Amino acid sequence: MPATWLGSRYALEPALIDVMRRDGELIAFRTPGSTEWLYPTWQFENGRPHPSIPRLVRAAREARIGESRLHEILNARRGLNGYGYVYELLFAGRDDYVVELVRAG
């Protein structure tokens, strides 16, 4: 979702959302040819970013993985049957595993 939608949904200023993205507190990506940042809504839990988001962003930056690739990794289907998404593992307490997947790129 765009920052304006997030701002109205979670009572945050779009400028603050951009600062949070730059500081590694939120995950955002751009679609090819667009200048607008999009923020996956799954990264929010009770109106706040999931606590492991900064760790994931830091791991991606250290591995020189861009925002779009990070988004692809976290939104990939998991398992041989494509059951669920990688990001769902965060909510199952498997943060360390997801961080390792991000580092592997």
Image (cartoon, grey):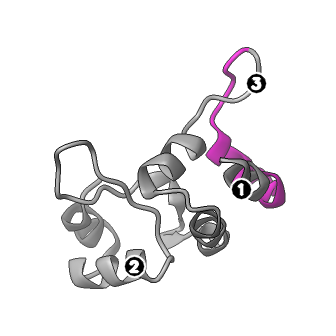
Do labels 3 and 2 touch, CB within 8 Å?
no
Counting residues from the N terminus, which is met first, the one under dot 3 or under dot 2?
2
Q: What stretch is highlighted in magenta?
A: 81-97
Residue 32's disc is: none
Counting residues from the N terminus, which is met first, the one under dot 3 or under dot 1?
3
Marks 3 and 2, Cα distance to the nearest angstrom?
A: 32 Å
Between 10 and 33, the one nearer to me in the picture: 33
* Picture coordinates of residue 32, whole percent (x, y): 24, 42
Instruction: Locate residue 79 relative to residue 7 in the image: left or right.
Output: right
Q: Mark 3 points at which residue?
A: 79
Counting residues from the N terminus, which is met first, the one under dot 1 or under dot 2?
2
Asked if residue 97 is positioned above or below residue 51 in the image, the reply reads above
Q: Mark 2 points at which residue?
A: 22
Q: Name the residue under label 1.
A: 103
Residue at disc 2, secondary structure: helix
Quadrant in the rendering for residue 31? top left
Instruction: Locate residue 13 relative to residue 71 in the image: left or right.
Output: left
